[in-house]
Image (cartoon, helix red, strand yellow):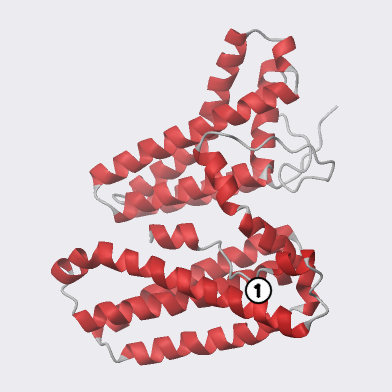
Amino acid sequence: MIVYLVTYPRGVRSFFEQADSLFLISYVTHMRKLVQYGMMYTFVRIAITNIIVVVIMLPVLMKSIEVTEIQVLLFWLFFTIFRFMLSLLTRFVHVHVGKRWVLWIVKNVVFSMSVSFFGISLFFIYKNPLYSILFIGLVIFLSSVLVKEKMNYKKFFFKEIEKEKEESMRWTSGIMQVGGHAVKPSSSNKKPWMFPRSKRLLGKKADSRIVESFLKEFFRTSTARIFYIQIVCISTASIIMTPRWIAAIVLVFAVVAISRYARDYWNEFTNKMFLRLYCDEGKLLLLRWKADRYLLLPAILLYGIVILSQFYLLPAVVGSVVFILLIVWIVFLPLKKSH
């Protein structure tokens, strides 16, 4: 499941950035070959990754769950074709959906449906290997439809190029994040879709306004936001799916990773806002600690709700509804500043 969560946002490659730079767009044959090479590359990458996952999980599958060698092979085959289909679907959604909030909704709906379908399929294949014919056949059919749609590249050529450039820079941005190098805060003048209008959530004091500006800037930056969401989702899944001692280690790692990334982002933020000219190092350190607490608060609340659900389901459901409504009100609903 952790591998699934990490690899879900990745779409199938098409290598259109080379076509754009080499002016190959007018050569249909070359363009189709680029699309085919991209799909072959994606399929091979997924197949190799899934082999590694199956080999790691082999002792658990063979001894604890007591599956046969044929079932292990069928699991690998289904997971490989399913991940390839999901990569095609992910890229299809990215290039066809325009508005960012619609894209967010569609991606979450697709994610929920795909997780449910994946779990149901594995359950039936585990019960009876003959069900693999049905589920693998269905995934192959959906993949063929998406491949046919992928070959009609002309209408969404430039969106494909944009996604390809993001994909090619994925490892660079990832290495920067892991190495503790935060992406610089955005200085775009476009109207933000998160925190659309000014809200004095933390008060009107100067220190609170500095911390609030940092938090808004952090979550408005796509790389920082994606990093935060991925870390929180993976660590939350570990609470449900792993033993308690492993979950504790993952939670500590998640908190440290978020704090480390936020520290480097804070340094960029203070340089951008020239805060070092007006505040001494001691005050900036106190403000950073305060910003860290607010940044970790949503994650800690989510961890608490998930842990509570292990013992008391109804209070956890009520808490999750309140948590979601609070996040929506704070992040997305505009509120004009009172005069």
Which percent across, then down, holds residue 140?
49, 87
Q: Is residue 258 visible?
A: yes
* Depth check, front residue: 320 or 41: 41
**Disc 1 element:** helix
Q: Residues within 10 Å of mark 1 (few under 14, many from 20)?
A: some
Q: Pointer 1: what residue?
A: 92
Which percent across, then down, holds residue 230?
50, 50
Query: From the viewer's perspective, is 329 left or right of 49?
Result: right
Query: From the viewer's perspective, is 285 left or right of 336?
Result: left
- Rendered image quadrant of residue 151: bottom right
Please tell me which residue is depicted at 72% across the width and 66% down the height of the picture.
18
Query: From the viewer's perspective, is 142 left or right of 219?
Result: left
Q: Amino acid at mark 1?
A: Phe
* Depth check, front residue: 169 or 112: 169
Please tell me which residue is depicted at 41% across the width and 86% down the height of the picture.
136
Location of the N terminus by quadrant is: bottom left
Please tell me which residue is depicted at 74% across the width and 10% down the height of the picture.
277
Which percent across, then down, holds residue 186?
74, 38
Task: Establish if 176 lies above or below 55.
Answer: above
